[in-house]
Image (spheres, helix red, strand yellow):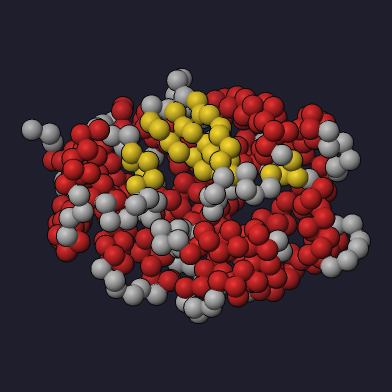
Amino acid sequence: MPPSDTIIAQRFVQLALALEQHLPGYVDTYFGPPEWKEQSIATGPRPIDQLAQEAADLAAAIKQEPTFDDQRRDYLGRQVTAMQTSLRLLQGEPLPLVEEVTLLYDITPTWVDEREFDEAHRRLDELLPPGDSLFERLSQHKQSIEITYAQAEPLLSIITERLRQLTRARFPLPDEESFELYPVTNQPWRAYNWYLGHGQSRIDINTDLPLHITDLATTLAHEGYAGHHTELSIKEARLLQAQGRPEHCLALINSPACVVAEGIAVQALDVLLSEEEQIRWHAEEIFPRAGYLHLDAVREHAIDRVMRELGSVWDNAAFLLHEQHQSTAEVSAYFQRYGLHRESEADKAVEFISDPVSRSYIFTYGYGGKLLDALFAAKGNAVQWFTRLLTEPVTPSQIRAWLTP
């Protein structure tokens, strides 16, 4: 008979697979024993009340298991709290958005003062060439840096190899890992990493949305090296295979682990290359190879940094849609007004935050990135702390504990 800690971890996985039967997409990736998933599918959706009781029993077992260290107990306990919250939502319990996000992701979101967006607009106004409205000038700028997938494809392999070399030099990537890129359509996101197990991933690039020459390295770092693909490859090798922890044979889309995962992905390129190195790489290799010799890498980098600050527009939009119950047209207009999105981009954004699985997920990006910013600023040695995040089961609460004297 397996030891008690393994049994608890197996119950965790099987409960997640049962939840997936009610909430398709809840299990973002699964690479555990095939028979567990096959059994869950064969059984079909089980009563939610029954799953809620199993989750309560599992939470109690995690608290009482004597072989768990504090970190594993914290990780599993908060993951199960998120499961219990998903079950409450499935039962129709109306949770305020802040409470939902807090229980699912172990973070507490707040409304962002729109003066921050106005300040970002002011700085963009200084960086962009003079002309019509800021919206029109930014739209013209975006058009000037657009690149088709066919044009980008040769560059993507070059960028991927550079990022892979940098990641391998700093972090414990498994030997037999790789990913493949695929262009796709009809998706609400720009890019997505599908981890397949055994160190392999498929990364989809949504060609419905325009690609930009300035975003290629950031996207491949976020999804691949040293972002999602890197984290899942390392944790599968270290936590699942080497340490025999079954809870790491899957990733759940609505859980505290997502905040850490998105924080890792948001910070991936900056951990691999300094700001100056990124600018030089664009100026000396990426832009020239694509024929974009007219671009000023320093200015493009500054524009990109300001645009990142407008990422919090998504957070406010989620509040408008789900707390203030504004119409999708009104929320799309908000994206256009403060995020400076084109109408088609704004509509895609509203589609993303309208989905029941991803409506609260949007907060993981900004809060994950800011949490890691605070960690690296307080502790220094970003590579050392990034390595811990890649190799250990970490929750936002644990990162906050690291930050507390």
Nearer-the-camera pick, 251 or 182: 182
Work out whether 176 lies above or below 271: above
- Locate residue 303, reporting x and y percent: 77, 53
* Residue 34 seen in this snapshot: yes
Farthest residue, direction left:
1
Work out whether 339 lies above or below 188: below
Residue located at (49% from left, 56% from top): 364
Give the quadrant of residue 99.
bottom left
- Locate residue 375, reporting x and y percent: 53, 51
Nearer-the-camera pick, 338 or 259: 338
Residue located at (8% from left, 33% from top): 1
Farthest residue, direction front:
186
From the viewer's perspective, tell me whether residue 179 is left or right of residue 64. right
Counting the numbered discs, the total is 0
- Locate residue 97, reporting x and y percent: 43, 71
- Locate residue 6, reporting x and y percent: 18, 38
Residue located at (45% from left, 38% from top): 194
From the viewer's perspective, tell me whether residue 5 is left or right of residue 75. left
Give the quadrant of residue 125.
bottom right
Work out whether 306 lies above or below 268: below
